[in-house]
Image: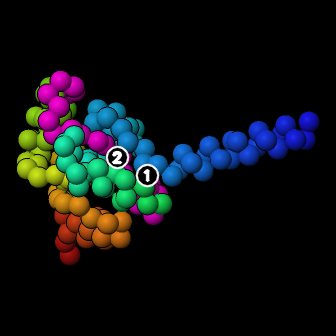
Amino acid sequence: MKKLFLLFFLFTFTQLVFAQQEIQWMKFEDAIAANEKNPKMLLVDVYTDWCGWCKKMDKETFTDPKVVEYINAKFYAVKLNAEDTKRTFTFGGREFNEAEMAAAMRVRSYPNFVIIEPTLQNIAQLPGYRQPEQFLAGLNELIEKAFRPKP
């Protein structure tokens, strides 16, 4: 019985640890709904299926434990395919597909990371591939410049 309990405990603990080792990606509309209940910034990863640097970000930067922990703590993380014209959602009382939303956010290169502040009014962009340390530094600098009140 003790062995069974120990196995159950180890399995449960392992699942919790691994769950935190991935960014909790959401659909755009799910992030907006979550933001209504608990306001946080949105980090929108705007990508295309053909973008090699986007795939490199997914494989190397978005699997880094520090990046995963930071994004999951500070943001609602969204994946948005800049060429998807089929999947639609409502934002700001208007219907968008993912391609239209990328265009509305003025994304013109990939990968591109759009930060939306909790009131969903202001956005800022962090374009281009970045290694984990560069990505975190770039995010912090962008947030400081774009969203912190000026003295």
Which residue corresponds to the image point at 23% horizontal and 55% vertical from the top-left?
53
In front here: 83 or 148?
A: 83
Give the left or right position of residue 47, taking residue 17 as reference. Answer: left
Which residue corresponds to the image point at 42% horizontal and 48% vertical from the top-left?
23
Residues under numbered marks 2 and 1 in contact, where contact means CB atoms less than 8 Å apart:
yes
Give the structural element (helix, strand or loop) at label 1.
helix
Disc 1 target residue: 72
- Residue stretch rendered in magenta on the structure: 66-90
Q: Is residue 124 above or below residue 38?
A: below
Give the left or right position of residue 39, taking residue 85 as reference. Answer: right
Q: Is residue 54 visible?
A: yes
Amino acid at circle 1: Asn
Q: Position of residue 139 (x, y in %)?
A: 28, 64
Residue 77's disc is 2
In front here: 110 or 37?
A: 110
81 magenta-colored: yes
Which residue corresponds to the image point at 29% horizontal and 42% vertical from the top-left?
79
Quarter occupied by the C terminus: bottom left
Q: Is residue 74 visible?
A: no
Q: Position of residue 54 (x, y in %)?
A: 25, 51
Give the left or right position of residue 4, taking residue 123 as reference. Answer: right
Which residue is outermost to the bottom?
A: 151
Picture quadrant of residue 57: bottom left
The answer for how far apart the CA atoms under marks 2 and 1 are is 7 Å
Residue 57's disc is none
Q: Position of residue 99 (x, y in %)?
A: 13, 35
Which residue corresponds to the image point at 61% horizontal and 46% vertical from the top-left?
16
Quarter occupied by the N terminus: top right
N-terminal-most mark, 2 or 1? 1
82 magenta-colored: yes
